[in-house]
């Protein structure tokens, strides 16, 4: 396996708060990492920096050979379109676009749209019969599956999932977890923030943060 | 995808956009009605002023028999220098005598031009429409009363040792000196007086602005040093001044309405920009550049402006017809050229009103996605 993510001394300061404080770790391509820790430990800040949604105060975050910390606004925009896919706890679908249009929106900002590919992506997550439904007509689990299809449509190097099952009931949670497991088996690199230890145990490694600092990195197979 | 996104954006925000559209249609309707009325009122006023008759008089210098000029030369310059649509009529006056040796002012002119040069004449009987009619004349009402003339009567007029007979074609009521005069063919009067190809003045109805008319008069004065061309200032300047004031009023009102419409759109767009922060944050998170996102919104606003312009024009036409009939009591004809003008103005106002959308450039996706 090759190293896809290299985080070195990553620090983020908001006013007097050090949201991240010298965090250092690596992620191999194809790995599934569970990012865990209490609220305010810096998990979301870390995932936002790796996703190009935020910039660090110091340190480096190299993804697929490029340091996210060095990008300007335009560079970050291209990076988000090309290198990463997001799955959010709140789904974050555009409410007036249909399921297929939400997926195509990511294609549109990446390059050109391909409706057939978008349809295949939705069929892949079991929503072939929900293509023309708007988010309000979909259940929470279905919305999250649309979000997963959208995150994968541009073949990103890194899939970032922030509490992807946090707003789902047990049945839908299982569907999304099964999807992530399949994606992992197919070789996708996944960095997932979760509070749920049982979901965390599905990953290859668990990175635990507290007060913005890296507490420990646990290889799950060794733990079991 | 642009078109698809564009229509879904409109569908998804149709409530707010409808408010902006109503403001644009309202502004467009008033603008369209005002321009329609302005153009038509201008046309009607110009026609009204034309009905006032001559607005330039070209007269020979000097007094008595010396106050004459060459008809063919003067007419040649008028035709060559006059703007298109210029109507002229030469005059030669003399004091003739009736068989009873009563003096009467006889004017030779082109009576086929009387309706343009002296449109206020009321003629009882028949007007004379043929310029070469040397047998008939029109007599002022005072002359008719003095000599008991009616249409069909005969009158003999003498000048020096010559005389001429005319049949009265009509009686003129002008409310002016013309009521005391007899009008007939110019050549007949020239023959009677022996002043062949000589005239005392030309009355002209010249189209165009005050400045254009004054320029034409100056050119005539240069070309004809023995004559004096004078605009009849009262008519020319009143026409110019009134049209300028109407235009100023219309432009001021139009600007005011455009500003008010722009403010309405601005308020709606400010609310819409706040509502769209989440969408824009998400689009940015998905790799959308702010240029691409704002272009989408601006296209939406431009289409809104164009649609508002078209609908506004149509409502404006209805308003024009209604106001013309009910307020001014005249039929005002809507003008098609107002349509593109209304569309351009409304698109401009809509785009200016969309300024709050630039705030979306400052949206931080991470902040929006946190739900703040």
Image (cartoon, rainbow, N blue to C red):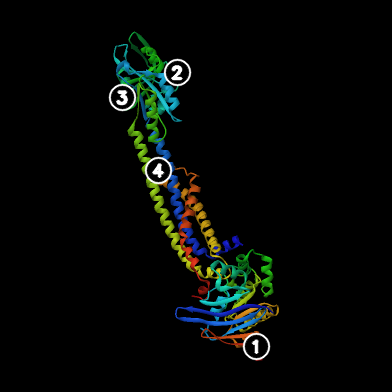
Where disc 1 sits, the SS reads: helix
Q: Nearer the viewer, mark 4 or mark 1?
A: 1
Where disc 3 sits, the SS reads: helix
In this rendering, the answer to whether B84 lies above or below B111 is: below
Mark 4 — residue? B329
Mark 1 — residue? A220
**Gap between marks 3 and 2, in whole Å?**
25 Å
Mark 3 or mark 2: name the one nearer the start of the chain: 2
In this rendering, the answer to whether B63 lies above or below B1 is: above
Q: Nearer the viewer, mark 2 or mark 4?
A: 2
Q: Nearer the viewer, mark 3 or mark 4?
A: 3
Q: Chain of mark 2?
A: B
Mark 3 or mark 4: name the one nearer the start of the chain: 3
Q: Chain of mark 4?
A: B
Q: Chain of mark 1?
A: A
Decide: few, some or many residues near mark 1? Use Cα within 10 Å; few <14, some 14-19, many ≥20: some
Where disc 4 sits, the SS reads: loop
Decide: few, some or many residues near mark 3? Use Cα within 10 Å; few <14, some 14-19, many ≥20: few
Q: Are marks 2 and 4 on the same chain?
A: yes
**Do tag 3 and tag 2 residues touch (Cβ < 8 Å)?**
no
**Gap between marks 4 and 1, in whole Å?**
91 Å
Mark 3 — residue? B177
The mark found on residue A211 in the picture is none
**Do tag 2 and tag 4 residues touch (Cβ < 8 Å)?**
no
**Gap between marks 3 and 4, in whole Å?**
34 Å
The mark found on residue B132 in the picture is 2
In this rendering, the answer to whether B335 lies above or below A51 is: above
| Residue B342: percent from left, percent from top | 48, 50
Depth check, front residue: B368 or B233: B368
């Amino acid at each position: 396996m090759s190293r896809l993510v290299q985080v070195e001394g990553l620090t983020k300061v908001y006013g007097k708060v050090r949201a991240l404080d010298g965090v250092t770790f690596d992620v191999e391509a194809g790995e599934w990492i569970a990012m865990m820790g209490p609220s305010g430990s810096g998990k979301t800040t870390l995932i936002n920096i790796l996703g190009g949604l935020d910039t660090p105060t110091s340190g480096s975050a190299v993804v697929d050979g490029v340091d996210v910390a060095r990008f300007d606004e335009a560079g970050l925009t291209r990076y988000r379109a090309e290198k990463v896919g997001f799955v959010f706890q709140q789904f974050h679908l555009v409410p007036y676009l249909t399921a297929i249009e939400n997926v195509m929106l990511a294609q549109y900002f990446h390059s050109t749209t391909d409706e057939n590919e978008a349809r295949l992506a939705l069929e892949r997550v079991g929503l072939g019969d929900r293509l023309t439904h708007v988010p309000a007509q979909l259940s929470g689990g279905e919305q999250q599956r649309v979000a997963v299809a959208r995150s994968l449509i541009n073949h990103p190097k890194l899939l970032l999932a922030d509490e992807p099952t946090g707003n789902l009931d047990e049945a839908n949670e299982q569907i999304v977890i099964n999807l992530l497991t399949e994606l992992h088996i197919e070789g996708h690199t996944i960095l997932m923030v979760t509070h749920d230890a049982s979901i965390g145990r599905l990953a290859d490694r668990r990175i635990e943060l507290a007060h913005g600092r890296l507490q420990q990195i646990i290889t799950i197979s060794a733990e079991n | 995808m642009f078109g698809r996104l564009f229509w879904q954006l409109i569908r998804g925000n149709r409530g707010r956009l409808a408010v902006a559209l109503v403001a644009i249609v309202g502004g467009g309707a008033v603008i369209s009605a005002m321009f329609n009325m302005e153009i038509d009122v201008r046309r009607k006023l110009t026609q009204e002023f034309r009905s006032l008759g001559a607005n330039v008089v070209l007269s020979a210098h000097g007094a008595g028999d010396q106050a004459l000029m060459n008809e063919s030369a003067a007419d040649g310059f008028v035709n060559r220098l006059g703007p298109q649509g210029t109507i002229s009529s030469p005059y030669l006056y003399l004091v003739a005598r009736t068989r009873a040796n009563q003096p009467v002012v006889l004017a030779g002119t082109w009576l086929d031009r009387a309706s343009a040069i002296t449109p206020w004449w009321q003629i009882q009987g028949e007007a004379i429409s043929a310029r070469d009619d040397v047998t008939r004349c029109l007599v002022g009402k005072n002359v008719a009363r003095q000599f008991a003339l009616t249409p069909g009567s005969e009158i003999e007029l003498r000048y020096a040792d010559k005389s001429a007979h005319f049949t009265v074609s009509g009686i003129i009521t002008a409310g002016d000196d013309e009521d005391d005069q007899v009008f007939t063919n110019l050549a007949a009067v020239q023959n009677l007086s022996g002043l062949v190809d000589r005239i005392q003045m030309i009355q002209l109805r010249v189209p165009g602005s005050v400045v254009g008319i004054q320029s034409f008069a100056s050119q005539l004065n240069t070309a004809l040093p023995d004559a004096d061309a004078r605009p009849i200032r009262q008519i020319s300047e009143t026409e110019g001044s009134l049209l300028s004031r109407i235009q100023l009023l219309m432009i001021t009102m139009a600007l005011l309405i455009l500003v008010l419409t722009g403010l309405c759109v601005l308020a709606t767009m400010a609310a819409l920009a706040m509502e769209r922060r989440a969408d824009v944050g998400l689009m940015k998170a998905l790799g959308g550049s702010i240029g691409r996102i704002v272009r989408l919104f601006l296209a939406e606003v431009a289409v809104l402006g164009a649609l508002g312009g078209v609908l506004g024009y149509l409502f404006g036409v209805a308003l024009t017809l209604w106001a013309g009939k009910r307020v001014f009591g005249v039929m005002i004809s809507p003008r098609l050229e107002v349509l593109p003008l209304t569309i351009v103005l409304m698109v401009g106002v809509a785009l200016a009103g969309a300024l709050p959308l630039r705030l979306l450039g400052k949206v931080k996706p991470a902040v929006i996605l946190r739900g703040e």
